[in-house]
């Protein structure tokens, strides 16, 4: 028996010698088994009984050393007998869950090994023998990160999607999407869809088939630690999570041709106001389609050069409600009061009186849809220009998933 193998005494009488053979090169494995098994399993058990020493159990792992390759599952294999338990714990805390095969010979982790992590493997066989092994994975040369919307523990409107924007390109979209697990309190049907964010970065949104039901609780568990995002993307080295709740069923309906907007709650109109949209016929026109309220920004400085309109304006604007990344807002526009209710003469935004803008601002919440109709528009809100996924049919949206 090789002295290099650990010996563990059992509290119960041994029935046979169990050797746990980790996945190693074939020649190495054969040599190890030959050196340890001697005259075979029966002979080993007999010898153990004769000299009073506990039979030996040994394990090996498919990952070894101080710079093991991350991104794959951990596998433990038993040459003889059956595994009873296997645990794989990370030096930074946490553990990898896994399953023992039906024949009891192997254990494979459900998640992959993460970069730059020290792991300890401990195994026990059905005869009470035990052994352990350690390995450390190589550090990630490049790390990918993400930002999540909506924020954690927030209450949002019925059109708010789950939105994930990545710092670096994502080539392995299917692997990433598979790790993004959405759960809802009422089994809401929905789908991920990949798109390009207005910033140019890769982004994936999860939207329901229809608007959320009020009161729905949503959780995203992004189990990304150890996922390789592909060329130029790097590795994820942590998991992410966010939770949010859906608020009241509110919809803002905007009629560009009629120059009015109204707020509907649970199907009933609760507010309306005359307004002026963007000047038709050019870049100053408003967008049509469904835009989602992204943020309530209060009083902000709006400058025309930031949206490609030269030096047309530079104003402090009150009650600002952002609808797109390209700069379409609903807000107070007292300087345009002569056009409210009768003409579209803004630089693209939906302008109202101070009092009406204040009333709307107080009632809407992030995630509420603005359903904008009318001929006086320059096009439809794009998917990545804010949250434009609602302007894509459900069938077409599903095709944007990397897993469909």
Image (cartoon, rainbow, N blue to C red):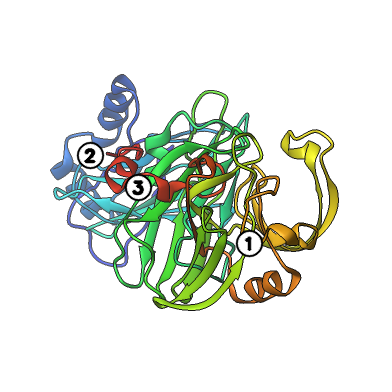
Q: CA distance from mark 2 to mark 1?
A: 77 Å
Query: Which residue, given by chain and number where applicable, does mark 1 sit on?
Result: 275
Comes first in the chain, label 3 or label 2: 2
Residue drawn where x is 33% and y is 60% of the image: 210
Q: Nearer the viewer, residue 112 or 382?
A: 382
Q: Is residue 251 above or below residue 196?
A: below
Instruction: Residue 134: tell me if it is visible.
Output: no
Is 374 positioned to the left or the right of 313 in the image?
left
* Between discs 3 and 1, the one toward the N terminus: 3
User: How far apart are the alpha carbons under marks 3 and 1?
Assistant: 59 Å
Percent x, y of residue 161: 47, 56
User: Mark 3: which secondary structure?
Assistant: strand
Quadrant in the picture for residue 287? top right
Q: Position of residue 203 (x, y in %)?
A: 51, 40
Q: Nearer the viewer, mark 3 or mark 2?
A: 3
Count neighbours of disc 2 (C-alpha within 10 A) and say few if under 14, some if 14 to 19, many if 20 or more.
some
Label 3: how many residues lie within 10 Å, few (<14), some (14-19) or many (20+)?
many
Locate the C terminus and report the quarter of the image it occupies: top left
Does residue 244 appear to the left or right of 105 in the view shown?
right
Q: Which mark is residue 79?
A: 2
| Frontmost residue, 54 versus 159 | 159
Which secondary structure lies at badge 2? loop
Q: Tag on residue 109?
A: 3
Tell me the quadrant of the picture where the N terminus can be found: top left
Badge 2 vs badge 1, beta-carbon distance below 8 Å:
no
Dot 2 or dot 1: first in sequence order is 2
Does residue 315 appear in the picture of this structure? Answer: yes
Residue 119 left/right relative to 41: right
x%, y% of residue 289?
46, 49
């Amino acid at each position: 028996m090789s002295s290099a193998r650990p010996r563990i005494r059992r509290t119960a009488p041994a029935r046979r010698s169990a050797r746990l053979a980790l996945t190693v090169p074939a020649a190495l494995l054969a040599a190890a088994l030959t050196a340890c098994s001697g005259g075979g399993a029966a002979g080993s058990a007999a010898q153990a009984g004769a000299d009073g020493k506990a039979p030996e159990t040994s394990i090996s792992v498919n990952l070894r050393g101080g710079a093991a390759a991350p991104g794959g599952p951990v596998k433990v294999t038993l040459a003889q007998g059956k595994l009873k338990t296997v645990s794989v714990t990370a030096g930074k805390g946490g553990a990898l869950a896994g399953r023992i095969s039906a024949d009891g010979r192997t254990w494979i982790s459900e998640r992959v090994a993460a970069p730059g992590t020290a792991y300890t493997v401990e195994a026990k066989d059905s005869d009470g023998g035990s052994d352990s092994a350690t390995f450390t994975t190589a550090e990630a040369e490049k790390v990918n990160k993400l930002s999540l919307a909506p924020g954690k523990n927030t209450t949002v409107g019925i059109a708010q999607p789950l939105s994930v924007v990545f710092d670096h390109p994502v080539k392995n979209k299917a692997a990433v999407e598979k790790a993004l697990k959405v759960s809802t309190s009422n089994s809401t049907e929905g789908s991920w869809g990949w798109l390009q964010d207005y910033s140019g970065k890769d982004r994936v949104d999860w939207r329901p088939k229809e608007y959320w039901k009020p009161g729905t609780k949503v959780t995203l568990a992004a189990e990304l630690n150890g996922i390789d995002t592909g060329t130029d993307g790097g590795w994820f080295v942590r998991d992410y999570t966010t939770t949010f709740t859906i608020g009241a069923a509110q919809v803002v309906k905007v009629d560009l041709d009629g120059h009015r907007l109204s707020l509907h709650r649970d199907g009933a109109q609760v507010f309306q106001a005359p307004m002026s949209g963007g000047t038709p016929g050019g870049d100053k026109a408003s967008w049509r389609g469904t835009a989602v309220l992204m943020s309530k920004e209060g009083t902000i400085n709006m400058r025309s050069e930031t949206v490609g309109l030269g030096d047309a304006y530079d104003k402090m604007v009150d009650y600002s409600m952002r609808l797109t990344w390209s700069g379409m807002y609903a807000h107070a526009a007292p300087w345009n009061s002569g056009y409210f209710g009768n003409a579209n003469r803004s630089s693209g935004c939906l302008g109202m009186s101070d009092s009406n803008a204040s009333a709307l601002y107080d009632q809407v919440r992030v995630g509420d849809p603005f359903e904008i109709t009318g001929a006086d528009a320059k096009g439809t809100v794009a998917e990545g220009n804010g949250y434009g996924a609602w302007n894509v049919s459900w069938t077409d949206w599903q095709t944007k998933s990397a897993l469909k």
